[in-house]
Image (tube, coloured by chain):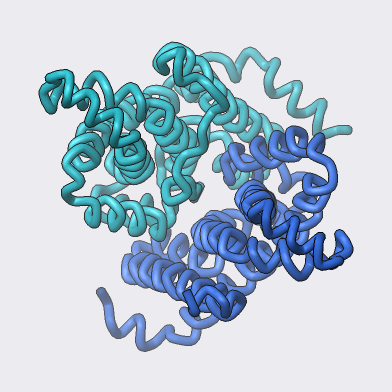
Amino acid sequence: MELVSEVVAWFTDPANWSGTTGIPNRLFEHVMLSIAVIVVGVAVSVPLGLAIGHTRRGAFFTVSVANVGRAIPSYALLLIFFTVFGIGFATAFPALLALSIPPVLTSTYVGVTEVDPDIVEAGRGTGMTESQLLRRVELPLAMPVILAGIRTAAVQVVATATLAALVGGGGLGRFIVDGFALQQDDQLVGGAILVAVLALLTERSFTYLERAMVSPGLRRRTPEAPLTAAARSA
Amino acid sequence: MNWEWIAGNLGQIVDATVDHIVLTGIAVGVGFALSLVFAMLIYRDRRWYSPISGLTGVLYTIPSLALFAMLVPITGLTLVTAEIGLVSYTLLILTRSIVSGLDGVPADVVEAADGMGFTPRGRLARVDFPLAVPLIVAGLRIATVTTIGLVMVTALIGEGGLGNLMLRGFNFRNYTAVYVGAIVTVALAVVADAVLIWLGRLATPWSRAR
């Protein structure tokens, strides 16, 4: 296989491991953008989802956000954001953020509403305040579902950050887009392997996060994100 | 919005839409057929569950652009490349929805059917599958809406339907084409979703009686 040896050569070429166009820097750009998006997305969606789930107010709003979010393809979202904000990797941020919110918001809301009402009632009976109920009862019980939603969002953001290169951005997508443009299969496939591995690692890492954040009493098979949040689009 | 451009290029917009529908239809059709095979394997022998869900899970997680990039050196800038990618993304959702649909058939119903003398195959076709339709349709809706979005990415390998319209619009700073492509895609997703809901109702006449 000529392609395999070309790709191996690409990976082992020291020139591809240094400078702003090297693998380490592209990986750094990709990971930093993804982390920034997920952190902000979680900071916005989880409190909102908890509030909506606890009060049961605004459920219609959540479902609508999730449905609209699912219908707009990330690729379309990205192109539209670039027509508004101009070209560049940093402007991929709002587009990716918009993409990360629906899955996290829906799964947080669904996770909280699925908590057994008897348990919440029991907590209320022991004299817990509403905010204690939310923090000590509903949040821990909803945690597996919330994490599943964040996992869906994180994988999607890592995947879509690749498309940012299409509109002049950096990140690992650069190798793929340039590989296509210059018809360099080594760079094309090398970049593709890096992106695929990063996405799979992102997925995997949530298994460990789950182990650390979910109460031992609740540990079971990894739950699926609610169907409304599961659609992928990149 | 440049309305004149829209009026002057209606033919192009319609062509892109038709391409988009065809690409989606092939992907969901082939994906459904493969998922049926997977679901039947799992239905017969549970040991197939882990390898199949592992494989479809990995395929689902690989970003589309990366998957297309890996395929291009092998299968070229062709429809086949686009469809291999699009089909692989439907497998996880469809297989899972068929399996959970079949699993969800109540045990009493299965017992009653066996008692009435259904053969295993007859029961599968005339009892289990009809009762699994709502969940299968739910899976088909998600797979279809998802595929409509993913078809756009295949613009990079020369297909893309409406994604192609958008990408060209973007490259030539013709933002009207970008907005038209996005609006028609969303409309397509909404219509496809509604059609599948309607087909699901047609396939389960008993659910209306309740």
Q: Is residue A20 visible?
A: yes
Q: Which chain is cyan?
A: A
Q: Which chain is blue?
A: B
The answer to which quarter of the image holds residue B171 is: bottom left
The answer to which quarter of the image holds residue B134 is: bottom right
Q: Position of residue A57 (x, y in %)?
A: 16, 48
Left/right of residue A5 with respect to residue A176 in the rendered view: right
Q: Residue at x 67, y 68 (%)?
A: B130
Q: Nearer the viewer, residue A3 or B121?
A: B121
Q: Is residue A198 visible?
A: no
Q: Nearer the viewer, residue A6 or B138?
A: B138
Above/below status of A181 relative to B37 = above
Q: Position of residue B169 (x, y in %)?
A: 41, 65
Q: Residue at x 25, y 38 (%)?
A: A49
Q: Nearer the viewer, residue B194 or A178?
A: B194
Q: Residue at x 73, y 45 (%)?
A: B71
Q: Position of residue B208 (x, y in %)?
A: 49, 78
